[in-house]
Amino acid sequence: MFRLLILLCTLVPAVAQTRLLVSAVDARTSRPIKNLQASEVIVTDDKTNRPVMELKPASGPADVMLLLDTGLAGPMVQPLAYDLIDQLNDPEQMALVGYADSAELIEDFTSSKERLKQAVAKVRYGNQPQVLDALAAAIGDGFERSTYRRALLLLTAGYEGRSATAERAVVKLARKGGVSIFPIYVTGVMRGLFEELARQTGGATFNLKEMARDATGQPAARIFDVVRNPYMITLRGTAELSERMKIQARRPGKPFLSALPVE
């Protein structure tokens, strides 16, 4: 009888699954939602429901690329760069990349806060920012030395030039490289673009003007709290998720959910 049970178990096909790395943020406070339940999550792709089989916390260290705006308005966000560097914990590392019409590596991945701050101090401003071109260049070449989960903090005044790269191409690169994009911006001119980049890559957006209205906790600490506390969600089925994928939560308030497909 025991051998028969073993045989039957081996004949039962495994359930096809897809995994997503998910960020869940309260958009009113820019803080992570830390009590999310699988029963609250709705995932659809091209209007087709994708049942959630499992949801569990996936907290842990991340290797962070800080993509710093070097445009004319770049100095608006430079002070926050120092605060973000101070949030690094062992064994996390950070790389500093400046961007204008492309991306320039200023400091490769390191755990040295001193080296990173010295690199920020050397940045020269006054260029024409082209966000999508810079994201494509940074994601394509910048994470070769990373070890942990990959997060890209896009620290920008919020202006976009005339990028040759399409938003769709950036999302594709980020998904292929396992990179979550977290835009941090001042002006909301490109808010829709930033939210879509985050939504399709498991990231989140942070409006610094809105965060300034909430004095409980500095912005840098809140940003890293979100970066470090994603969820891993398992869906039924293996169909590749398209750019029409939507992930939502049945709960009051303004929950913002995003997802990065994980191989």
Image (cartoon, rainbow, N blue to C red):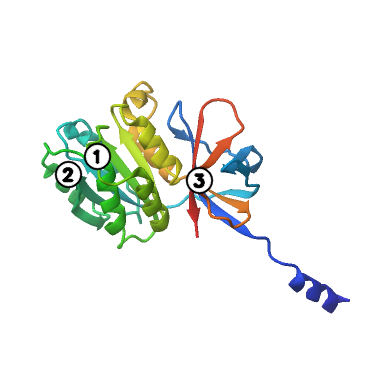
Residue depicted at 54% across the width and 25% down the height? 253
Q: Secondary structure at mark 2?
A: helix
Instruction: Using the rendered image of the protein, determine whether residue 87 is visible from the camera's viewpoint.
Output: no
Q: Amino acid at mark 3?
A: Val
**Mark with earlier residue (1, 3):** 3
Q: Secondary structure at mark 3?
A: strand
Residue labelled with disc 1: 81
CA separation in Å, label 2 and label 1? 7 Å
Q: Amino acid at mark 1?
A: Ala
Residue 57: image location, x then y, percent: 54, 48
Considering every residue shown, the one lying at the far bottom of the view is 3
Mark 3 burial class by Cα count in 10 Å: few <14, some 14-19, many 20+: many
On the rendered structure, is 205 left or right of 259? left
**Mark with earlier residue (3, 2):** 3
Above or below 26: residue 116: below
Nearest to the eye among marks 1 and 3: give it.
Answer: 3
CA separation in Å, label 1 and label 3? 25 Å
Q: Are marks 2 and 1 in contact (CB under 8 Å)?
A: yes
**Mark with earlier residue (2, 1):** 1
Residue depicted at 68% across the width and 61% down the height? 15
Residue 113: image location, x then y, percent: 23, 49
Residue depicted at 58% across the width and 39% down the height? 36
Mark 1 burial class by Cα count in 10 Å: few <14, some 14-19, many 20+: many
Considering every residue shown, the one lying at the far right of the view is 1
Q: Give the image quarter of residue 75.
A: top left
Residue labelled with disc 2: 120
Q: Amino acid at mark 2?
A: Val
Instruction: Using the rendered image of the protein, determine whether residue 201 is visible from the camera's viewpoint.
Output: yes
Q: Nearer the viewer, residue 245 or 93?
A: 245
Q: Secondary structure at mark 1?
A: helix
Residue labelled with disc 3: 22
CA separation in Å, label 3 and label 2? 30 Å
